[in-house]
Image: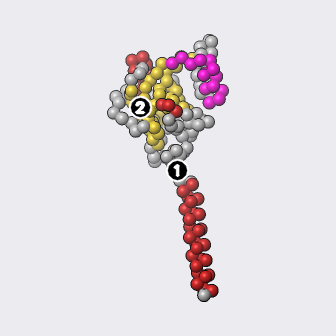
Amino acid sequence: MKTFFATALLVAGLALSSAAQDKHQDAHKPSEGAATVDSAEVVKRGAPLGDSPQVKFADALKEPQKYAGKTVRIEGVVRRVCKKEGCWMEIAPDAESETVRVTFKDHGFFVPKDGDGLKFRAEGELKLKTLSKEEVDHLVKDDGAKVKTNPDGTANEVTFVATGVELWK
């Protein structure tokens, strides 16, 4: 009888140990909202990309008014990401070009905070916007954005409001 109880306790202990180990491993697996990017994966955020017209990002920057308010897809390089939440990113057609700030429609999703330097594909709308001095101050001081300001502290900017984003190395 002692052998039976000893065996039962051993089996129960192994089962609990195995369950605890599985739970520990699950806690360290990347999830949909994971904040890191694996070199072999494409990180997708927001809505799946649709069949909107693909526009050369450099062309869109040369004539933003031509594309303003139209849903398009663009590709390029992520230059900077908000380090607090991943709630915006600065993107460019390539590593040397001027950047455009991307926000995410209705703050519906965030991107990995370590996404600097990744390639991206995004679908959304280009917008022409004037930022107030307060908005500029928030972006620069709180989030670390780089913004070209007007003499009065405001800024004119071309932004991109993304409905969906794909990121990869």
Q: CA distance from mark 1 to mark 2?
A: 24 Å
Q: Nearer the viewer, residue 92 or 24?
A: 24
Residue at the image position 62 percent from the left and 30 percent from the top: 143
- Residue 142 lies in the magenta-colored region: yes
Against 11, is 62 above or below?
Answer: above
Question: Which quadrant of the view contains residue 14?
Answer: bottom right
Q: Residue furthest bottom?
A: 1
Residue type at tag 1: Pro
Q: Which mark is residue 123?
A: 2
Q: Magenta part mainly helix, strand or loop?
A: helix
Disc 1 designates what residue? 30
- Residue 59 lies in the magenta-colored region: no
Residue at the image position 51 percent from the left and 18 percent from the top: 129
Residue type at tag 2: Glu
Against 93, is 31 above or below?
Answer: below
Residue at the image position 60 percent from the left and 77 percent from the top: 10
Answer few, some or many: residues within 10 Å of disc 1's Cα (few below 14, many 20 plus, some between 14 and 19). few
| Callouts 1 and 2 close, C-beta under 8 Å | no
Task: Specify the color scheme.
Answer: secondary structure
Residue at the image position 39 percent from the left and 18 percent from the top: 66
Over which residues does the magenta segment extend? 129-143
Q: Residue furthest top?
A: 151
